[in-house]
Image (cartoon, rainbow, N blue to C red):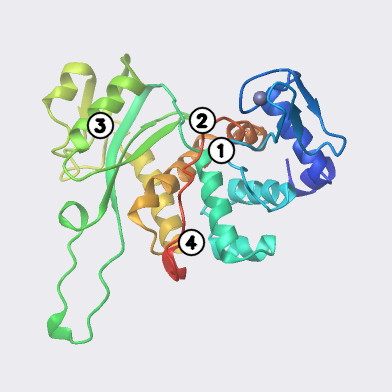
Amino acid sequence: MNIHEIYKTFPTQKDCLNHLEYLRWKDEPVCVNCGSTNVTKFKSELRWHCNDENKSFSVLKDTIFEGTRLPLQKWFYAIHLMLSAKKGLSAMQLSRNLDVSWNTAWYTSMRIRCAMQDQSYILEGIIQSDSTYIGGKPRKTNKKVDRIKHKRGKGADKEQIIGYIEKKPNGKVIAKHVKKDTETLELLNLLKSNIKADRSVLITDEGKEYTQEFDKIIQRYMVKHKDEFSSYGLNTNTIESFWAIIKRGITGQYHHLSKRYLPFYISEFAYRYNNRNNKQMFHDLLNEAVEDEKCFINMKPKKGVKSEL
Ligand SMILES: [Zn+2]
């Protein structure tokens, strides 16, 4: 759906609500508090009444839209913009597009990122694995003598992301932010839960995180980057390209984002990558958005820190 179609299909708040009600309940509305189907729509058509509890409710409860005062049409617009922005969309840019405050834009985009989480893909075939490090360089000190050479890669004080990617057209990626020194364990867990090992070949570099445990589970080919980047067409180029998209996005759009929210940004980049050929991406995301308990309710930008993103 392009932006014109969105405006034509959902011209009013009521149209947006009707659509979300359909996605969440299909043809059988249920009370979001008690699960009763003994419910009646109010005349205004914006809320429902539970006849068992004698209380009113909205389809937005327990979804990413809960408690919002922003018109749903702007939410739909924001979703469209985020799905189309290959390199990411800053809260500043979104606030200009939606004509809302920076805080509202930040909050809206974080909630949308919540809907992009939990992608439980199962990978198979030729699979590349790698890890990368994300984080800003320390600020330059005034005096040259105080400056220290920045460490790169593993030794530096950066956040580590691990991942697996299928090397094929429309192949999927799984990526995860991990705590320091847990990369081997996390990689093994993902391997066991999300990869059909008996139908796959794993390609890694010579990184120490890939212990002998991996070879017990899956056939593995190691590319020695010291000697060559690709051998007989086996390489880790696909996952490295995915890291490059994340890194360019984070440096270009989000600048200094806090470690706490990094997993949400990784979900966003993975979601766009995994749906790059999906023409129904907008509708699929709305479906995710109305699922129960998708969000991390307590997120707030740090007070007064506008450069957070
Ligand atoms: Zn009820």
Q: Which residue is mark 2?
A: 170
- Quarter residue 207 falls in: top left
Type of residue at label 4? Answer: Gln
Q: Which residue is mark 3?
A: 187
Residue sitting at x 44%, y 25%: 121
Residue displayed at 30% across by 27% down = 190
Q: CA distance from mark 2 to mark 1?
A: 8 Å
**Dot 3 crowding, Cα within 10 Å, few <14, some 14–19, many 20+:** many
Q: Earlier in the sequence, mark 3 or mark 1?
A: 3
Residue 162: x percent and y percent? 29, 39
Q: Are marks 4 and 3 in contact (CB under 8 Å)?
A: no
Q: Which mark is residue 253?
A: 4
Amino acid type, label 3:
Leu
* Cα distance between the residues tagged 3 and 2: 22 Å
For the residue carrying disc 1, how many other residues have a C-alpha within 10 Å: few (<14), some (14-19), or many (20+)?
some
Q: Can you identify the residue that label 1 sits on? A: 276
Q: CA distance from mark 2 to mark 4?
A: 26 Å
Please tell me whether mark 3 or mark 1 is closer to you in this view: 3
Determine the residue located farthest toward the front in the rendered image. 54
Q: Is residue 23 left or right of residue 108?
A: right
Identify which residue is drawn at 55% across, 61% down.
91
